[in-house]
Amino acid sequence: MSNLINSKIKPFKATAYKNGEFKEVTEQSLLGKWSVVFFYPADFTFVCPTELGDLADYYPQLKDMGVEVYSVSTDTHFTHKAWHDASETIKKINYAMIGDPTGTISRNFEVMIEEEGLALRGTFVINPEGEIKVAEIHDLGIGRDAKELVRKIQAAQYVAAHPGEVCPAKWTPGESTLAPSLDLVGKI
């Protein structure tokens, strides 16, 4: 997976369910803005709705930051619609829910569990040029935190806008950053 950092997203074409409609999504859809591609194992499960609901709660803030969100599982877009209609938690989702029944997108991002036909919990932050800047993969039983994802995106956006600066651990907007130099070696 380490070779995914700074790599360009690979081509794909899929159908997503978003705001009551089916929409085509390709790798080109992710260009020109910051994007999050959020893989999860399957619809109608246990940990997945908690994560997707948490992400839905932060979606307005992410939109304000210029970030679009795409959730992906190996279910179909039809299953995404059925889940959206059946679950109060999933009903609040306004971001695209991409169906990846062939596993193409899951394989592109190296999260496919081949023997199960499911994706691991993978989170990828992609810059407007289509380069992966954050890649995080969790085991199926470990849920993610959208608040921490927001912080990571804020740091990625800051670093992109301020060449020569880096964000230390636990950095949040408004806090001090670092300018790597010989003077800092051994001083932190």
Image (tube, helix red, strand yellow):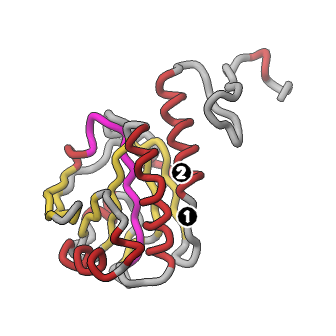
Provide residue 60's location: percent of width, then percent of height: 41, 48
Mark 2 burial class by Cα count in 10 Å: few <14, some 14-19, many 20+: many
**15 on left or right of 181:** left
Residue 113 makes an appearance in the image: no
Kindly identify which numbered label has been placed on residue 43.
none
* Residue under label 2: 149
Front in this rendered view, residue 114 or 125: 125
Q: Quadrant of residue 34?
A: top left
Above or below residue 3? Residue 73 is below
**161 on left or right of 130:** right
SS type, badge 2: helix
Provide residue 42's location: percent of width, then percent of height: 37, 78
Q: Amino acid at mark 2?
A: Leu
How far separated are the C-alphas under marks 1 and 2? 8 Å
Q: Is residue 59 on the magenta stretch?
A: no
Q: Residue at x 50, y 72 (%)?
A: 50
Q: Amino acid at mark 1?
A: Arg
Q: Residue at x 46, y 57 (%)?
A: 123
Q: Residue at x 35, y 52 (%)?
A: 69
Above or below residue 140? Residue 161 is above
**165 on left or right of 98:** right
* Residue under label 1: 144
Q: Quadrant of the C terminus?
A: top right
Residue 127 makes an appearance in the image: yes
